[in-house]
Image (tube, helix red, strand yellow):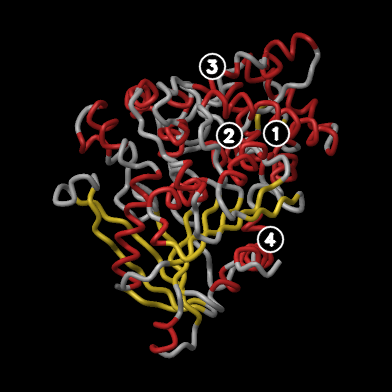
Amino acid sequence: MTTYRQPGVVVTDHHFPVPLDHARPDGEQIEVYGRELVAAGLGDAERDRRPWLLYLEGGPGFGARRFIGRQAWIGRAVREFRVLLLDQRGTGRSTPANRQTLPLRGDAAAQAAYLTHFRADSIVKDAELIRRRLTGGAPWTVLGQSFGGFCAVHYLSTAPEGLERVLITGGLPSLDATADDVYTAAYPRVRRKNDAHFTRYPRDAERVRAIAAHLLDHEVTLPGGGLLTVEAFQSLGILLGSGDGTHQLHHLLEGAFVPTPTGPALADAFLEQVQAHLSYAGHPLYAVLHEAIYAQGQGPTAWAAERVRADFPEFDAAAALADGRPVLLTGETVHPWHFTTDPALRPLRETAELLAERDDWTPLYDPDALAANRVPVAAAVYHDDMYVDTAHSLETAAAIRGLRTWVTDEFEHDGVRAGGPRVLDRLLALSRGEL
Protein backbone atom coordinates (compact mmCIF):
# COMPACT_ATOMS: atom_id res chain seq x y z
CA MET A 1 0.00 0.00 0.00
CA THR A 2 1.10 3.55 -0.74
CA THR A 3 -0.15 6.46 1.38
CA TYR A 4 0.10 10.16 0.59
CA ARG A 5 -1.72 13.41 1.33
CA GLN A 6 -4.00 15.73 -0.54
CA PRO A 7 -5.74 18.84 0.83
CA GLY A 8 -7.78 17.69 3.83
CA VAL A 9 -7.48 13.95 3.19
CA VAL A 10 -5.06 11.06 3.53
CA VAL A 11 -5.05 8.79 0.47
CA THR A 12 -4.06 5.12 0.44
CA ASP A 13 -3.78 2.95 -2.67
CA HIS A 14 -5.09 -0.62 -2.36
CA HIS A 15 -4.59 -3.47 -4.82
CA PHE A 16 -6.79 -6.55 -4.41
CA PRO A 17 -6.35 -9.89 -6.22
CA VAL A 18 -9.74 -11.34 -7.18
CA PRO A 19 -10.78 -14.33 -9.29
CA LEU A 20 -11.57 -13.60 -12.92
CA ASP A 21 -14.42 -16.09 -12.57
CA HIS A 22 -15.85 -16.20 -9.06
CA ALA A 23 -17.24 -19.66 -9.79
CA ARG A 24 -13.59 -20.77 -9.95
CA PRO A 25 -12.01 -19.00 -6.96
CA ASP A 26 -8.74 -20.91 -7.37
CA GLY A 27 -8.48 -20.08 -11.05
CA GLU A 28 -7.02 -17.08 -12.86
CA GLN A 29 -6.69 -13.93 -10.78
CA ILE A 30 -6.98 -10.31 -11.88
CA GLU A 31 -6.38 -7.15 -9.87
CA VAL A 32 -8.86 -4.55 -8.67
CA TYR A 33 -7.66 -1.17 -7.48
CA GLY A 34 -9.28 0.97 -4.79
CA ARG A 35 -8.35 4.43 -3.50
CA GLU A 36 -9.06 4.99 0.20
CA LEU A 37 -9.76 8.52 1.45
CA VAL A 38 -9.92 9.48 5.12
CA ALA A 39 -10.02 12.86 6.79
CA ALA A 40 -6.63 14.30 7.59
CA GLY A 41 -5.75 14.65 11.26
CA LEU A 42 -7.37 11.45 12.54
CA GLY A 43 -5.47 9.23 14.92
CA ASP A 44 -5.11 5.56 14.08
CA ALA A 45 -7.80 4.48 16.54
CA GLU A 46 -10.30 7.08 15.36
CA ARG A 47 -9.62 6.24 11.71
CA ASP A 48 -10.12 2.53 12.36
CA ARG A 49 -13.48 3.20 14.05
CA ARG A 50 -14.85 4.97 10.99
CA PRO A 51 -17.36 2.94 8.96
CA TRP A 52 -16.61 2.35 5.30
CA LEU A 53 -18.38 3.85 2.28
CA LEU A 54 -17.82 2.17 -1.08
CA TYR A 55 -18.29 4.35 -4.17
CA LEU A 56 -19.29 2.64 -7.41
CA GLU A 57 -18.82 4.83 -10.48
CA GLY A 58 -21.17 5.17 -13.43
CA GLY A 59 -20.45 3.58 -16.77
CA PRO A 60 -19.93 0.79 -17.50
CA GLY A 61 -16.24 1.11 -18.25
CA PHE A 62 -15.17 4.11 -16.18
CA GLY A 63 -12.74 4.01 -13.31
CA ALA A 64 -13.77 5.95 -10.21
CA ARG A 65 -13.32 9.64 -10.83
CA ARG A 66 -10.14 11.19 -9.51
CA PHE A 67 -11.18 13.67 -6.86
CA ILE A 68 -8.59 16.05 -5.48
CA GLY A 69 -8.81 16.48 -1.74
CA ARG A 70 -12.37 17.20 -0.61
CA GLN A 71 -13.95 17.94 -3.98
CA ALA A 72 -17.66 17.39 -4.65
CA TRP A 73 -19.25 15.06 -2.07
CA ILE A 74 -15.95 13.80 -0.65
CA GLY A 75 -15.71 16.54 1.98
CA ARG A 76 -19.09 15.50 3.41
CA ALA A 77 -18.27 11.80 3.21
CA VAL A 78 -14.95 11.91 5.05
CA ARG A 79 -16.55 13.67 8.00
CA GLU A 80 -18.18 10.32 8.76
CA PHE A 81 -16.67 7.55 6.63
CA ARG A 82 -13.57 5.94 5.31
CA VAL A 83 -14.23 6.14 1.58
CA LEU A 84 -13.14 3.55 -0.98
CA LEU A 85 -13.26 4.70 -4.61
CA LEU A 86 -13.29 1.45 -6.58
CA ASP A 87 -11.98 1.10 -10.12
CA GLN A 88 -14.34 -1.65 -11.24
CA ARG A 89 -12.66 -4.59 -12.96
CA GLY A 90 -11.22 -3.69 -16.33
CA THR A 91 -11.17 0.07 -15.65
CA GLY A 92 -8.71 2.64 -14.34
CA ARG A 93 -5.83 1.01 -12.46
CA SER A 94 -7.55 -2.35 -12.22
CA THR A 95 -6.36 -5.01 -14.69
CA PRO A 96 -7.21 -3.14 -17.91
CA ALA A 97 -9.40 -4.47 -20.70
CA ASN A 98 -8.91 -2.59 -23.96
CA ARG A 99 -7.69 -2.95 -27.56
CA GLN A 100 -4.08 -3.27 -26.36
CA THR A 101 -4.59 -5.86 -23.63
CA LEU A 102 -7.47 -8.01 -24.86
CA PRO A 103 -5.44 -9.68 -27.66
CA LEU A 104 -3.47 -11.32 -24.84
CA ARG A 105 -6.60 -13.43 -24.28
CA GLY A 106 -6.55 -14.81 -27.83
CA ASP A 107 -9.03 -14.36 -30.67
CA ALA A 108 -12.32 -12.46 -30.61
CA ALA A 109 -14.21 -15.45 -29.20
CA ALA A 110 -11.75 -15.73 -26.30
CA GLN A 111 -11.96 -11.99 -25.69
CA ALA A 112 -15.76 -12.08 -25.64
CA ALA A 113 -15.75 -15.02 -23.23
CA TYR A 114 -13.35 -13.10 -20.96
CA LEU A 115 -15.57 -10.00 -20.97
CA THR A 116 -18.64 -11.94 -19.84
CA HIS A 117 -17.03 -11.68 -16.38
CA PHE A 118 -17.15 -7.85 -16.34
CA ARG A 119 -20.80 -7.15 -15.56
CA ALA A 120 -22.44 -6.07 -12.31
CA ASP A 121 -22.54 -9.61 -10.92
CA SER A 122 -18.74 -9.94 -10.98
CA ILE A 123 -18.24 -6.37 -9.76
CA VAL A 124 -20.39 -7.06 -6.70
CA LYS A 125 -18.56 -10.31 -5.97
CA ASP A 126 -15.31 -8.34 -6.12
CA ALA A 127 -16.77 -5.83 -3.68
CA GLU A 128 -17.75 -8.56 -1.25
CA LEU A 129 -14.24 -10.04 -1.22
CA ILE A 130 -12.77 -6.59 -0.70
CA ARG A 131 -15.27 -5.73 2.07
CA ARG A 132 -14.33 -8.78 4.09
CA ARG A 133 -10.64 -7.93 3.75
CA LEU A 134 -11.06 -4.28 4.76
CA THR A 135 -13.83 -4.28 7.36
CA GLY A 136 -13.27 -7.56 9.13
CA GLY A 137 -16.73 -8.63 8.02
CA ALA A 138 -18.69 -5.51 9.00
CA PRO A 139 -21.22 -4.29 6.42
CA TRP A 140 -20.56 -1.03 4.63
CA THR A 141 -22.47 1.79 2.97
CA VAL A 142 -22.54 1.75 -0.84
CA LEU A 143 -22.97 4.88 -2.95
CA GLY A 144 -23.78 4.01 -6.56
CA GLN A 145 -23.82 6.62 -9.32
CA SER A 146 -25.66 5.68 -12.54
CA PHE A 147 -24.34 2.21 -13.53
CA GLY A 148 -22.93 2.08 -10.01
CA GLY A 149 -26.57 2.17 -8.88
CA PHE A 150 -27.32 -0.78 -11.15
CA CYS A 151 -24.51 -2.63 -9.36
CA ALA A 152 -25.97 -1.58 -5.99
CA VAL A 153 -29.37 -3.06 -6.89
CA HIS A 154 -27.63 -6.31 -7.84
CA TYR A 155 -25.84 -6.11 -4.48
CA LEU A 156 -29.21 -5.82 -2.72
CA SER A 157 -30.45 -8.81 -4.71
CA THR A 158 -27.56 -11.15 -3.97
CA ALA A 159 -25.52 -10.05 -0.92
CA PRO A 160 -27.60 -7.76 1.32
CA GLU A 161 -25.70 -9.04 4.37
CA GLY A 162 -22.75 -6.95 3.20
CA LEU A 163 -24.72 -3.70 3.21
CA GLU A 164 -25.29 -1.24 6.04
CA ARG A 165 -27.21 1.09 3.72
CA VAL A 166 -27.38 1.90 0.01
CA LEU A 167 -27.45 5.34 -1.60
CA ILE A 168 -28.21 5.60 -5.32
CA THR A 169 -27.92 8.64 -7.57
CA GLY A 170 -29.48 8.43 -11.02
CA GLY A 171 -29.07 4.66 -11.12
CA LEU A 172 -32.26 2.70 -10.45
CA PRO A 173 -32.48 0.22 -13.35
CA SER A 174 -35.57 -1.48 -14.65
CA LEU A 175 -35.70 -4.97 -13.16
CA ASP A 176 -37.03 -6.59 -16.32
CA ALA A 177 -36.81 -4.20 -19.31
CA THR A 178 -35.00 -5.51 -22.38
CA ALA A 179 -32.40 -3.43 -24.17
CA ASP A 180 -35.08 -2.72 -26.79
CA ASP A 181 -37.39 -1.42 -24.06
CA VAL A 182 -34.63 0.80 -22.69
CA TYR A 183 -33.95 2.48 -26.04
CA THR A 184 -37.59 2.74 -27.01
CA ALA A 185 -38.01 4.84 -23.87
CA ALA A 186 -34.75 6.72 -24.44
CA TYR A 187 -35.15 8.23 -27.90
CA PRO A 188 -38.17 10.41 -26.96
CA ARG A 189 -36.24 11.71 -23.93
CA VAL A 190 -33.32 12.60 -26.17
CA ARG A 191 -35.71 14.41 -28.51
CA ARG A 192 -36.94 16.49 -25.57
CA LYS A 193 -33.37 17.38 -24.63
CA ASN A 194 -32.73 18.52 -28.22
CA ASP A 195 -35.86 20.67 -28.17
CA ALA A 196 -34.83 22.26 -24.87
CA HIS A 197 -31.33 22.97 -26.18
CA PHE A 198 -32.54 24.60 -29.39
CA THR A 199 -35.03 26.67 -27.40
CA ARG A 200 -32.22 27.94 -25.19
CA TYR A 201 -29.77 28.41 -28.07
CA PRO A 202 -31.86 28.94 -31.24
CA ARG A 203 -28.89 29.54 -33.54
CA ASP A 204 -27.46 26.14 -32.66
CA ALA A 205 -30.14 24.44 -34.75
CA GLU A 206 -28.68 26.03 -37.88
CA ARG A 207 -25.13 25.34 -36.73
CA VAL A 208 -25.94 21.65 -36.31
CA ARG A 209 -27.55 21.57 -39.76
CA ALA A 210 -24.50 23.24 -41.32
CA ILE A 211 -22.07 20.79 -39.69
CA ALA A 212 -24.20 17.80 -40.70
CA ALA A 213 -24.42 19.04 -44.29
CA HIS A 214 -20.66 19.53 -44.40
CA LEU A 215 -20.04 16.02 -43.10
CA LEU A 216 -22.33 14.51 -45.72
CA ASP A 217 -20.20 16.12 -48.43
CA HIS A 218 -16.73 15.73 -46.92
CA GLU A 219 -14.73 12.94 -45.30
CA VAL A 220 -13.42 14.39 -42.04
CA THR A 221 -10.73 12.73 -39.95
CA LEU A 222 -10.23 13.67 -36.32
CA PRO A 223 -6.71 14.43 -35.04
CA GLY A 224 -6.40 10.96 -33.48
CA GLY A 225 -7.42 9.15 -36.66
CA GLY A 226 -11.12 8.73 -35.95
CA LEU A 227 -13.75 9.38 -38.60
CA LEU A 228 -16.22 12.16 -37.96
CA THR A 229 -19.27 10.87 -39.79
CA VAL A 230 -22.68 12.50 -39.48
CA GLU A 231 -23.78 9.80 -37.05
CA ALA A 232 -20.65 10.26 -34.95
CA PHE A 233 -21.26 14.02 -34.84
CA GLN A 234 -24.87 13.43 -33.78
CA SER A 235 -23.65 11.37 -30.83
CA LEU A 236 -22.37 14.59 -29.24
CA GLY A 237 -25.93 14.78 -27.93
CA ILE A 238 -24.69 12.67 -25.03
CA LEU A 239 -23.66 16.02 -23.51
CA LEU A 240 -27.30 17.05 -23.17
CA GLY A 241 -27.86 14.72 -20.23
CA SER A 242 -25.43 16.43 -17.84
CA GLY A 243 -25.99 19.56 -15.80
CA ASP A 244 -23.85 21.93 -17.84
CA GLY A 245 -23.79 19.83 -21.00
CA THR A 246 -26.13 22.07 -22.98
CA HIS A 247 -23.75 24.99 -22.41
CA GLN A 248 -20.68 22.90 -23.26
CA LEU A 249 -22.35 21.86 -26.50
CA HIS A 250 -23.23 25.44 -27.39
CA HIS A 251 -19.66 26.64 -26.85
CA LEU A 252 -18.41 23.78 -28.99
CA LEU A 253 -20.80 24.45 -31.86
CA GLU A 254 -20.29 28.21 -32.07
CA GLY A 255 -16.64 27.74 -33.08
CA ALA A 256 -17.15 24.92 -35.55
CA PHE A 257 -16.09 26.59 -38.82
CA VAL A 258 -13.14 28.69 -39.95
CA PRO A 259 -12.60 30.34 -43.38
CA THR A 260 -9.90 28.77 -45.56
CA PRO A 261 -8.64 29.43 -49.12
CA THR A 262 -10.86 26.59 -50.35
CA GLY A 263 -13.92 27.61 -48.37
CA PRO A 264 -15.29 27.03 -44.87
CA ALA A 265 -13.77 24.08 -43.03
CA LEU A 266 -14.25 22.54 -39.64
CA ALA A 267 -11.77 24.19 -37.30
CA ASP A 268 -8.85 22.24 -35.87
CA ALA A 269 -9.83 23.42 -32.39
CA PHE A 270 -13.37 22.16 -32.93
CA LEU A 271 -12.17 18.77 -34.14
CA GLU A 272 -9.78 18.46 -31.18
CA GLN A 273 -12.63 19.09 -28.74
CA VAL A 274 -14.97 16.75 -30.59
CA GLN A 275 -12.38 13.99 -30.39
CA ALA A 276 -12.11 14.46 -26.62
CA HIS A 277 -15.87 13.99 -26.28
CA LEU A 278 -16.25 11.08 -28.72
CA SER A 279 -13.16 8.92 -28.19
CA TYR A 280 -13.59 5.68 -26.24
CA ALA A 281 -9.84 5.27 -25.71
CA GLY A 282 -10.17 5.91 -21.99
CA HIS A 283 -13.27 3.78 -21.45
CA PRO A 284 -13.67 1.15 -24.20
CA LEU A 285 -15.76 -1.18 -22.01
CA TYR A 286 -18.50 1.44 -22.07
CA ALA A 287 -18.97 0.70 -25.77
CA VAL A 288 -18.22 -3.02 -25.72
CA LEU A 289 -20.45 -3.90 -22.75
CA HIS A 290 -23.01 -1.11 -22.81
CA GLU A 291 -25.99 -3.12 -24.01
CA ALA A 292 -24.93 -6.18 -22.00
CA ILE A 293 -25.81 -4.33 -18.79
CA TYR A 294 -29.48 -4.68 -19.85
CA ALA A 295 -29.23 -8.35 -20.89
CA GLN A 296 -30.94 -10.83 -18.57
CA GLY A 297 -31.67 -14.03 -20.42
CA GLN A 298 -34.20 -12.40 -22.77
CA GLY A 299 -32.26 -13.17 -25.94
CA PRO A 300 -29.40 -11.32 -27.61
CA THR A 301 -29.23 -7.54 -27.44
CA ALA A 302 -28.33 -7.56 -31.16
CA TRP A 303 -27.40 -3.85 -31.34
CA ALA A 304 -30.69 -2.73 -29.83
CA ALA A 305 -29.94 0.99 -30.00
CA GLU A 306 -29.26 0.77 -33.74
CA ARG A 307 -32.36 -1.30 -34.46
CA VAL A 308 -34.67 0.84 -32.32
CA ARG A 309 -33.35 4.03 -33.89
CA ALA A 310 -35.06 2.97 -37.13
CA ASP A 311 -38.38 3.44 -35.32
CA PHE A 312 -37.54 7.12 -34.80
CA PRO A 313 -36.93 8.52 -38.30
CA GLU A 314 -36.69 12.07 -36.94
CA PHE A 315 -33.06 11.20 -36.04
CA ASP A 316 -32.17 10.61 -39.72
CA ALA A 317 -29.85 13.55 -40.46
CA ALA A 318 -30.01 13.34 -44.26
CA ALA A 319 -33.81 13.28 -44.24
CA ALA A 320 -33.93 16.20 -41.82
CA LEU A 321 -31.65 18.26 -44.06
CA ALA A 322 -33.75 17.43 -47.12
CA ASP A 323 -36.97 18.39 -45.32
CA GLY A 324 -35.64 21.54 -43.69
CA ARG A 325 -36.09 20.11 -40.19
CA PRO A 326 -33.64 20.39 -37.29
CA VAL A 327 -30.96 17.70 -37.27
CA LEU A 328 -31.35 15.95 -33.94
CA LEU A 329 -28.44 14.79 -31.85
CA THR A 330 -28.51 11.36 -30.21
CA GLY A 331 -27.72 10.33 -26.65
CA GLU A 332 -26.35 7.41 -24.68
CA THR A 333 -26.38 4.83 -27.45
CA VAL A 334 -23.70 2.56 -28.91
CA HIS A 335 -23.88 1.46 -32.55
CA PRO A 336 -21.94 -0.92 -34.81
CA TRP A 337 -20.41 2.04 -36.64
CA HIS A 338 -18.65 3.13 -33.44
CA PHE A 339 -16.35 0.16 -34.04
CA THR A 340 -15.45 1.56 -37.46
CA THR A 341 -15.08 5.26 -36.71
CA ASP A 342 -13.13 5.05 -33.42
CA PRO A 343 -9.54 3.73 -33.56
CA ALA A 344 -9.77 2.60 -29.93
CA LEU A 345 -12.69 0.31 -30.83
CA ARG A 346 -11.83 -0.91 -34.35
CA PRO A 347 -9.81 -3.94 -33.15
CA LEU A 348 -12.71 -4.93 -30.88
CA ARG A 349 -15.45 -4.98 -33.50
CA GLU A 350 -15.65 -8.77 -33.82
CA THR A 351 -15.56 -9.12 -30.03
CA ALA A 352 -18.42 -6.65 -29.71
CA GLU A 353 -20.40 -8.51 -32.39
CA LEU A 354 -20.06 -11.77 -30.48
CA LEU A 355 -21.25 -10.12 -27.26
CA ALA A 356 -24.22 -8.59 -29.11
CA GLU A 357 -25.16 -12.09 -30.37
CA ARG A 358 -24.87 -13.76 -26.96
CA ASP A 359 -28.20 -15.12 -25.74
CA ASP A 360 -27.39 -16.74 -22.38
CA TRP A 361 -26.83 -13.75 -20.11
CA THR A 362 -27.99 -14.50 -16.58
CA PRO A 363 -30.53 -12.34 -14.69
CA LEU A 364 -29.03 -9.53 -12.63
CA TYR A 365 -31.86 -8.76 -10.21
CA ASP A 366 -33.97 -10.89 -7.86
CA PRO A 367 -37.44 -9.32 -7.49
CA ASP A 368 -38.34 -11.57 -4.56
CA ALA A 369 -35.21 -10.65 -2.62
CA LEU A 370 -35.78 -6.96 -3.36
CA ALA A 371 -39.41 -7.18 -2.26
CA ALA A 372 -38.19 -8.57 1.07
CA ASN A 373 -35.33 -6.07 1.41
CA ARG A 374 -34.35 -4.93 4.91
CA VAL A 375 -31.38 -2.70 4.01
CA PRO A 376 -32.08 1.06 4.24
CA VAL A 377 -32.03 2.43 0.69
CA ALA A 378 -32.39 6.00 -0.57
CA ALA A 379 -32.29 7.01 -4.23
CA ALA A 380 -32.11 10.33 -6.05
CA VAL A 381 -34.24 10.08 -9.18
CA TYR A 382 -33.76 12.95 -11.61
CA HIS A 383 -36.85 14.21 -13.40
CA ASP A 384 -36.57 13.38 -17.12
CA ASP A 385 -33.08 11.93 -16.71
CA MET A 386 -31.72 11.47 -20.24
CA TYR A 387 -29.62 8.43 -19.37
CA VAL A 388 -31.86 6.40 -17.04
CA ASP A 389 -35.60 6.38 -17.63
CA THR A 390 -37.46 8.03 -14.76
CA ALA A 391 -40.55 5.83 -15.12
CA HIS A 392 -38.41 2.68 -15.02
CA SER A 393 -36.60 4.01 -11.95
CA LEU A 394 -39.82 4.74 -10.07
CA GLU A 395 -41.21 1.28 -10.90
CA THR A 396 -38.07 -0.24 -9.42
CA ALA A 397 -38.22 2.04 -6.39
CA ALA A 398 -41.71 0.73 -5.67
CA ALA A 399 -40.47 -2.86 -6.01
CA ILE A 400 -37.68 -2.54 -3.42
CA ARG A 401 -39.06 -2.79 0.09
CA GLY A 402 -38.38 0.31 2.17
CA LEU A 403 -36.64 2.30 -0.56
CA ARG A 404 -37.15 6.05 -0.21
CA THR A 405 -36.87 8.32 -3.24
CA TRP A 406 -35.97 11.94 -3.74
CA VAL A 407 -37.35 12.96 -7.13
CA THR A 408 -35.88 16.26 -8.24
CA ASP A 409 -35.36 18.46 -11.28
CA GLU A 410 -32.75 20.56 -9.50
CA PHE A 411 -30.02 18.40 -11.05
CA GLU A 412 -29.44 16.38 -14.18
CA HIS A 413 -27.94 12.90 -14.21
CA ASP A 414 -24.63 14.04 -12.70
CA GLY A 415 -26.25 15.54 -9.62
CA VAL A 416 -23.87 13.76 -7.23
CA ARG A 417 -21.07 15.78 -8.83
CA ALA A 418 -22.94 19.05 -9.23
CA GLY A 419 -24.80 18.90 -5.93
CA GLY A 420 -21.93 17.44 -3.94
CA PRO A 421 -22.46 17.47 -0.17
CA ARG A 422 -26.16 18.43 -0.41
CA VAL A 423 -27.02 15.33 -2.42
CA LEU A 424 -25.13 13.03 -0.07
CA ASP A 425 -26.62 14.73 2.99
CA ARG A 426 -30.13 14.34 1.62
CA LEU A 427 -29.71 10.65 0.80
CA LEU A 428 -28.12 9.83 4.15
CA ALA A 429 -30.97 11.60 5.96
CA LEU A 430 -33.57 9.74 3.87
CA SER A 431 -31.94 6.39 4.51
CA ARG A 432 -31.92 7.08 8.25
CA GLY A 433 -35.57 8.14 8.37
CA GLU A 434 -34.65 11.71 9.26
CA LEU A 435 -36.73 13.20 6.43
- Along the polypeptide, which appears first: circle 1 or circle 4? 1
Q: Which mark is residue 213?
A: none
Give x and y (percent) for residue 155.
42, 52
The amino acid pointed to by label 1 is Ala
Dot 2: what SS?
loop
* Residue at 24% from the left image edge and 48% from the top image edge: 22
The amino acid pointed to by label 4 is Gly
- Along the polypeptide, which appears first: circle 2 or circle 4? 2
**Number of residues whose C-alpha sits closer than 10 Å to that of mark 4, classed few (under 14), some (14–19) or many (20 or more):** some
Asked if the residues shown at circle 2 and circle 1 are in contact, with their CB atoms under 8 angstroms apart, the answer is no
Horizontally, residue 284 falls left or right of residue 104, namely right
Horizontally, residue 347 falls left or right of residue 205, namely left
Dot 1: what SS?
loop
Residue nearest the viewer, comparing 16 with 103: 16
Dot 3: what SS?
helix
* Residue at 56% from the left image edge and 69% from the top image edge: 74
The amino acid pointed to by label 2 is Glu
Disc 4 target residue: 419
- Along the polypeptide, which appears first: circle 4 or circle 3? 3
Give x and y (percent) for residue 77.
56, 71
Asked if the residues shown at circle 3 and circle 2 are in contact, with their CB atoms under 8 angstroms apart, the answer is no
- Along the polypeptide, which appears first: circle 3 or circle 2? 3
Q: CA distance from mark 4 to mark 3?
A: 36 Å
- Along the polypeptide, which appears first: circle 2 or circle 1? 1
Dot 4: what SS?
loop
Q: CA distance from mark 1 to mark 3?
A: 30 Å
Q: Residue furthest left?
A: 26
Pair 1/4: label in front: 4
Residue nearest the viewer, comparing 274 with 173: 173
